[in-house]
Image (cartoon, rainbow, N blue to C red):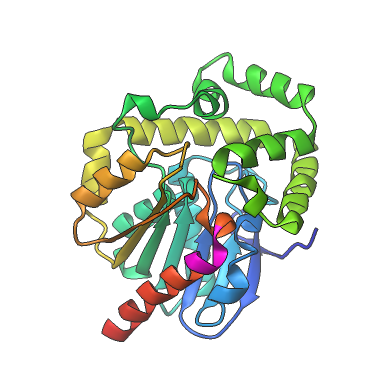
């Protein structure tokens, strides 16, 4: 499995520099993900941008190293990373799921450092109780329960192989797991094997899960944060997403009618893996307009 480089930002931060010419772009993965989430689309995005993919603290190959793995802490880490790789120019942020939430937080809190935002099936408040799936309850909600979350996850990891966990996850987060390139699947399995040896992997996942739940259940504060995002924003969602219900994306689009909103047909939670060419075309088209206006 190829790896990238490390920066010291109050501890090691792993990232992949995909190169490219043009405005800087930072790709931000979701919970349980890593820089590998972007390997299919990053080389194509690098045709028009200088592209970096970060591993957030507690995920991928970035250890907590005394840092927390909450969305607030990782927003601060993302801010430090963007200043390190692009000290003189605001960056384009592309955030998936939890990374989408962190992208919104960064854009709301540090608007001068974000040129544009692309939110890919971002974590959003639940607006329809029917949108809660058994997988979401098992993998994202139960871990937030004090006293049982960590033991439940540990038992699950002990009872399953890395391949079983990856295949189960892909079957749920995609509308059709066969669309995911085999090389990408194998890289995920290798990453999972590495993380099985990291004693901080499960505690980091649980800490992040709890912080997401806290952010999404405080709807009034979330809406206030949403309206503080001032940069040009593209909201992308898959209509077959079983992690973040499409209804939540429509709710966010109604909150911010000035944002561009695109819904992929027959696509789940990770369009950059399921329809990479269409995803890149959509992002490129949006950013071409942003940069032309700027």
**Residue 289 sits above or below residue 268 on the image:** below
For the question of whether residue 12 can be seen, the reply is no
147 falls in the magenta region = no
In this rendered view, identify the residue nearer to me: 151 or 7: 151
In this rendered view, identify the residue nearer to me: 148 or 141: 141
Image coordinates of residue 293 in percent, x first then y, are: 26, 83
Q: Which residues are magenta?
A: 275-279
Left or right side of 51 for 124: left
Left or right side of 248 for 16: right
How many numbered badges does the structure rendering display? 0
In this rendered view, identify the residue nearer to me: 183 or 5: 183
What residue is rendered at 75% in x and 55% in y?
A: 182
276 falls in the magenta region = yes
What residue is rendered at 46% in x and 42% in y?
A: 241
For the question of whether residue 180 can be seen, the reply is yes
Position of the N terminus, as image quadrant, is bottom right
Q: Quadrant of residue 184?
A: bottom right
What residue is rendered at 66% in x and 57% in y?
A: 36
Q: Quadrant of residue 294?
A: bottom left
Image coordinates of residue 40 in percent, x first then y, are: 63, 64
């Amino acid at each position: 499995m190829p790896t990238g480089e490390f920066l010291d930002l109050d501890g090691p931060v792993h990232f992949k520099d995909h190169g490219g010419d043009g405005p800087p772009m930072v790709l931000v993965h979701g919970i349980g993900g890593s820089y590998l989430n972007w390997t299919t689309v990053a080389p194509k995005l690098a045709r028009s941008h200088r592209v970096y993919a970060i591993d957030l603290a507690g995920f991928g190959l970035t250890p907590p190293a005394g840092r927390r793995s909450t969305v607030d802490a990782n927003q601060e880490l993302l801010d430090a990373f963007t200043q390190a790789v692009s000290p003189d120019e605001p960056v384009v942020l592309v955030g998936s799921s939890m990374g989408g939430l962190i992208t919104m937080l960064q854009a709301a809190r540090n608007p001068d450092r974000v040129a544009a935002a692309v939110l890919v099936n971002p974590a959003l408040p639940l607006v329809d109780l029917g949108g809660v799936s058994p997988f979401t309850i098992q993998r994202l909600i139960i871990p937030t329960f004090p006293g049982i979350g960590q033991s439940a996850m540990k038992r699950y990891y002990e009872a399953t192989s890395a391949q079983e966990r990856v295949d189960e996850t892909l079957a749920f987060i995609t509308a059709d797991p066969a669309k995911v390139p085999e090389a990408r699947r194998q890289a995920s399995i290798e990453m999972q094997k590495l993380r099985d040896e990291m004693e901080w992997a499960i505690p980091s996942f649980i800490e992040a899960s709890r912080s997401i739940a806290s952010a999404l259940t405080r709807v009034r504060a979330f809406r206030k944060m949403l309206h503080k995002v001032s940069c040009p924003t593209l909201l992308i969602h898959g209509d077959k997403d079983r992690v973040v219900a499409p209804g939540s994306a429509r709710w966010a689009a109604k909150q911010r009618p000035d944002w561009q909103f695109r819904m992929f047909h027959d696509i789940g939670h990770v369009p950059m893996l399921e329809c990479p060419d269409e995803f890149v075309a959509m992002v490129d088209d949006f950013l071409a307009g942003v940069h032309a206006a700027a």
